[in-house]
Amino acid sequence: MAITFARLVTRHLTQRSGAVRNLAYTARTAIYDPRLDTVFDYACLQGDLACHGIILPEGYPPRFAELDALAAALDLAEWAKVRTPLEQRTRPPQVGLALVVALPPSDELWLHEAAELFQRIVTEPSGSRTVPIHWAIHNADINCHGHAYYGLRVFDAEGRPGHRVRNFIARLRPSRFGTEVFEGVDWPSLVWETQQAYFEELGLELVVDPIAPAPGLHLSPVVYANGTIHNERTREQVLRARQQAHTANVAAIEGSPAELIEILLRGRSSLRVSELERLSAKFFDHPAERASKVERVLGDDEIVTMAENGAEKPRYLTTRRIHVLLTNAAQLIDDPGQQHISTITARDSASLVERLARHYFTGNYPSHPLILGHALSDCEGTALALAAREPFVGTIDMAVTGSDSLLATGRRRDLAFRPGRPVIVPHSERIDDQRLAQLLLEAKKHDVQLIFGHDQCRRHGIVARRLAAYAADRATPNSERYERNDIERLLRAGLVGLAIAAMADHGLLKFDHGFSRDIENPMCVVACQSRRRMRELADAIREQRVRSKISEAPEQMTTLRGTLSLSVGEWIVTTEACNAPALPAGQFARLVAVDRSVSVISVIHDGEIKKIDLDKFAAIRSASTLTIREARGLPLNMRLVVELAKDRHIWSSLLLVARHAHAELYVDPALATSAQELAEIAGRSLPGALPHEREMKPDSNAEIGKILLALQSKDPVETELFPEAPVAAPAPPQPIHMEERIRGMIASNSEGYRLLHNHVGHHNPARQANAAHILGLSNSNLLKALVRFLADHELERPRDELDDLDLPVELSELDPMRWTYGDIENARYELYTMAIPGSEWGLKPPLPPRNMTPVNSADT
């Protein structure tokens, strides 16, 4: 499943290493280092390299697109600045920043989608587009993950190095302890938001695992070359830290539901029920136990569950306190008579600062305004533009929402709210919903004029930070007319009202079913999300095109997946990756020939004719109808019709139409009949929609659970008939490092797992011989892994000294793709048979024979 792991470390120029060695390792290639006059060759590790590339800022020399040229330039640029020999320096010079991010597995994202997602993550931090970046994706056994390497110097068009780029990842300030980070990128939140927004864009019903209530610490133990931790003390430290984090998270889930949800919200206004289910699956093994923990939270009186647009089952939840807070803040924004809130939105940061300054100077506001931001860097541009008015600058935490120490800092900076004192928030889109709501209520309390700025270049407002986009979308419209190319930016910023109005102006919206005339065009495809509707449309389109003699009658091809109907000349789409010939998943090709005798078809893809053996690869189908995810890769010269009949995928459908040059959105009149009505429904359907936009609806399962619990508490029954039996062996350790499918399988076969631990656990003197015996009998690799885990054996694997660039050792949750369904079922069967008395495993003695007494015929 998608998780939120990210780690950024500094890479230094040393006598043995630099950018060349690091980039050769992550790219799994060989690069010559002119500084050290040696070749770093890691081509032997190419097996896990999925793809890689280089992102160059505008104006860089084209030769830097070659990895060896870029790597050598980064090292030589830093080497030229070295005056003190490296061996005499206590702090070697920094040559780059290395980022590692865990990516969703291949059963959730196709490879080209994972590459697009990762590039969005690495280019999101402010200033990252001014430096060269190398990125790579590794499909490792443990996790699919991405590497990014940031250069730290700017180069000109001739390749000459310039100044060092500072403060774009983290801002430092001197302290009595040396230097400390006082502002930096919140990588977990950035990774979570980018992944979740990308899933929404693809129209996928996936959620990113929430950040745990008590996040674990990622240690960096010293590891031997064979992959084992170097001593028992360090190994125990890693295991203890993992167990402590697990215990703390279980306690949080079993504690106060309101406290748990407010921790998980982390400033947001609502949480998906599926996120709570994912959290429960990470820390509880048995499926029934997982469901009971979720139902306990959903049924609590302090929890509000909500459904979207009349759905029968609630999909979101929040606490009553947050619901009231956000509802009151939204009412202030929606109040038609309010005069104390102004919102200004602009296409980029520079134009936003210009508009804020013009608004302030023309509005006859008094001097000494208060400028607040999520961080001090958010206020710099506006403070400089209003320098003549001598503004006071601070953060929202210093003024309203922070700790006692931060509020004390705000008092020293004179950040108090006073009547008549205007408050400017230049980048409201960077402030979470809860903080912004508290700011609104505090400003109302003190009768303060608020001026919000909203930067449309920030990709927020869809899954988080919705309140700022809500205010900008409802601001008094200005005279600016948005062009066709502006719509995508507006949608990504969460300004769905402005975006839909612009789409209506450009004729991209149709409120009828009148696209039937377009399907006779062989270059036209229809996108929708209902699989049943897609099949019906595909049959109707094929029949109409054959009847109009636009395409030939379809031929029936027998494949591994059943019968496939294809017509020569039509477009097809791949739903999985095909290696021979190379056809990645989600690719479009045109069918040019069919050979039924050998079940082979010929297609044109990337200007080449490729043959596909349907006996070996059958993950293709007609492209006359597509999902939103598939339609994103449609060639730009093709016409796209998007059918919108349900509100669940309004935003992804709108974004698809905005991205494609020849696309139109046909809205079912049962859903909406005007652009204004569609905008209202679209705002409510966003995953980050505010609580008041949704219908409060209790969860039926949780309500039933509350009734049953009340009945049980009224009639307690003493069931302890026997005293507790003495424990012959310690309880088996929980496999908390394994993914939930495996833990659920173990919980369902707890007797076999207990017997296995009794025989191979550390407490058993004969564990070595028992483990060897069981490993010899087992045919399941997963069960063998469990035996090694219970026997306290470390799994050895080859390891390079640069392996710390990859995911750390303690992040050992197994990739769901590592163990297949067959692996898990084989292990389930073997654990089950272990609990059978007298089985070949020898873990449980056979049952004693029953005493056979003769039957008395007289009794008969």
Image (spheres, rainbow, N blue to C red):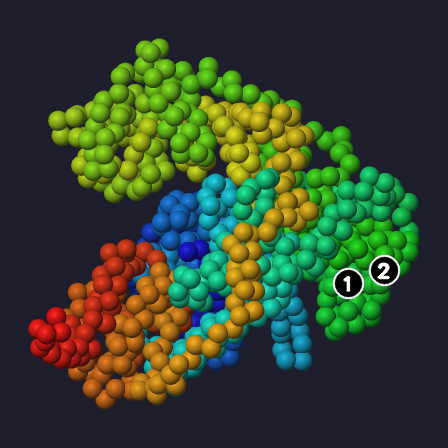
**Helix, strand or loop under label 1:** helix
Front-most of 132 and 415?
Answer: 415
Please say whether residue 166 is visible from this viewpoint.
Answer: no
Left or right, 523 with reference to 349: left
Circle 2 Cα neighbour tier, 10 Å, few/some/many (<14 / 14–19 / ≥20): some
The mark nearer the N terminus, 2 or 1, is 1
Q: Helix, strand, or loop for circle 2?
A: loop
Q: Residue furthest front?
A: 858
Q: Is residue 705 above or below residue 849?
A: above
The spot of residue 531 in percent (x, y) is 40, 34
| Residue name at image x 35 percent, y 67 percent | 747
With respect to residue 176, does 4 lie above or below?
above
Q: Position of residue 57 (x, y in %)?
A: 52, 47
* Residue bearing the label numbered 1: 400
Residue 598's spot in the image, x, y percent? 13, 30
Q: Give the residue at x 25% y 59%.
A: 825
Q: Could you tell me if residue 417 is visible in this image?
A: yes
**Mark 1 belongs to which amino acid?**
Val
Q: Are marks 2 and 1 in contact (CB under 8 Å)?
A: yes
169 or 301, nearer to the observer? 301
Q: How many marks?
A: 2
Name the residue carrying label 2: 417
Displayed quadrant of residue 791: bottom left
- 778 and 502: which one is in front? 778
Seen in the picture, residue 773 relative to 739 is either above or below; the reply is below
Q: Quadrant of the C terminus?
A: bottom left
